[in-house]
Image (cartoon, rainbow, N blue to C red):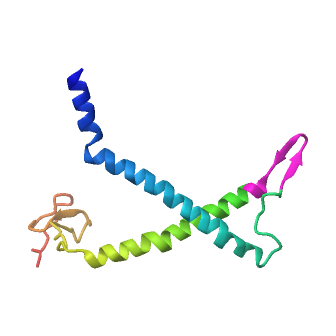
Amino acid sequence: MKDAVKDFKSFILRGNVVDLAVGVAIGAAFTAVVTSFTKNLLTPILAIPGDKASFADLSFSIRNATFKYGAFIDDVIGFVLIAAVLFFLVIRPINQMMARRKTEPEVLSTTRDCPYCLSSIPIAASRCAFCTANVAAAS
């Protein structure tokens, strides 16, 4: 029993579990912020050309079945707006920051394309293994 408690304690305190828990908590909080931004600041822009910002009341019925296509339109618009906010306010700035902070050198390729069959061959090859053509030495 003592070993099981010790193993459980080392599992819980392992960096991956703690990092994952923090990531989930921050992700939930960030989702709330992005959803609020979309719902309260971006979605009302839809009311500018039209008369309302929500399509939730739009529906049609066939016999006893009601199809609420307006709620679906609202969800699609919300998804597109959230994706745009995440892309332009999170993904692009992080990618630009990572590109500026890149410190490792470019990886040199160890292969080249055969000029005849376009297969990938080693740089030092003098004959293509696929089409057996003689190829000039790489410069």
In the foreground, 63 or 32: 32
Q: Is residue 99 left or right of residue 78?
A: left
Give me the residue at 8% from left, 67% from top: 124
Q: Which residues are magenta?
A: 59-71
Q: Is residue 1 left or right of residue 23?
A: left
Image quadrant where one finds the N terminus: top left
Q: Is residue 49 left or right of residue 137?
A: right
Give me the residue at 41% from left, 75% from top: 93
- In the rendering, at what x and y percent does residue 85 appear? 54, 70
Does the magenta-highlighted stretch encompass residue 68?
yes
Q: How many marks?
A: 0
| Quadrant hosting residue 76 | bottom right
In the foreground, 98 or 115: 98
Name, please, the residue furthest toward the right: 63
Give me the residue at 54% from left, 65% from top: 83
Name, please, the residue furthest toward the top: 1
Does the magenta-highlighted stretch encompass residue 34?
no
Q: Is residue 79 left or right of residue 87?
A: right
- In the rendering, at what x and y percent does residue 139 appear? 11, 79
- In the rendering, at what x and y percent does residue 67 appear? 81, 49
Task: Answer above or below: position of 59 versus 119.
Answer: above
| Quadrant hosting residue 75 | bottom right
| Quadrant hosting residue 80 | bottom right
In the foreground, 74 or 133: 74
- In the rendering, at what x and y percent does residue 43 appear? 68, 69
Give me the residue at 56% from left, 59% from top: 32
